[in-house]
Image: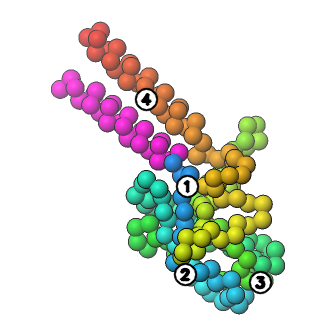
Amino acid sequence: MRRSPVLALVLGLGLLIGTASSVAAKGGIIARLDVPLPRYAQPGTVVTIGWTLIVPGSSGLIGTGTILRVYPSNGGATVDVPANEDRTGHYVATVTVPAGGIATIGIGIPGESCYAGGGCVPAVGFFTVTDPAGVPIASPPGELPSTATSGAPTKTTDDPSLVGLLVLVGSILLAQVIRSRRLA
């Protein structure tokens, strides 16, 4: 019975590391559209946009909340619409085409960006969006997807330093268990 706490700690540490690595591995995600973007849909028309998330080296982001952000052609205010996962790895969002039509879209995970001494603000970790053939669609002006391989890095709560912190805490806990077993 003495092994139960050690086994629980080892399993918990494995879960902790697995979770941390999945959070840090968001980079490289692609949202591939089911059909070409309806850029010529008339304002006021209701359209449904579907996509599949492709996560290299992973089974996907099952159950992760995602949004569709529509950028109007006339430069007006963006429209965010929550997406529904209708089957594993596939999402759909229904949106009313804004005045001016659709210039482009962004797809990502809503969250927040936090700055030292400045608090936190809502933010979206955008994916690279491609057409059905896999060709990337135009990114909104001044806004690169957070999974793009170039461009300025962004600070989000999915910071890779989280992985290091979780591994450090897990290592300390494991060392304490080993030490207490040696003393017993």
Which residue corresponds to the image point at 58% horizontal and 74% vertical from the top-left? Answer: 131
Pointer 4 with pointer 3, Cβ within 8 A: no
Query: Residue 91 at what x, y percent from top left?
Result: 49, 71
The mark lying in front, picked from 2 and 3, is 2
Q: Is residue 30 left or right of residue 90?
A: right
Residue corresponding to mark 2: 35
Instruction: Tell me if residue 3 is in the magenta stretch.
Output: yes
Three-letter amino acid code at the position of disc 3: Ala
Tell me which label, 4 or 2, sits earlier in the chain. Answer: 2
Query: Residue 147 at what x, y percent from top left?
Result: 61, 55
Tell me which label, 1 or 2, sits earlier in the chain. Answer: 1
Residues drawn in magenta: 1-24
Instruction: Tell me if residue 134 is in the magenta stretch.
Output: no
Q: Secondary structure at mark 2?
A: loop
Query: Residue 69 at what x, y percent from top left?
Result: 66, 69
Disc 1 and disc 4: Cα gap in Å? 27 Å
Label 2: how many Cα within 10 Å (few below 14, some 14–19, many 20+): few
Tell me which label, 4 or 3, sits earlier in the chain. Answer: 3
Q: Is residue 158 left or right of residue 5?
A: right
Disc 1 and disc 3: Cα gap in Å? 32 Å
* Whether residue 127 is situated above or below residue 162 in the rendered picture: below
Three-letter amino acid code at the position of disc 4: Gly
Residue corresponding to mark 4: 170
Q: Secondary structure at mark 4?
A: helix
Residue corresponding to mark 1: 28
Three-letter amino acid code at the position of disc 1: Gly
**Nearer the observer, 164 or 179:** 164
Residue corresponding to mark 3: 99
Which residue corresponds to the image point at 78% horizontal and 83% vertical from the top-left? Answer: 100
**Nearer the observer, 27 or 113:** 27
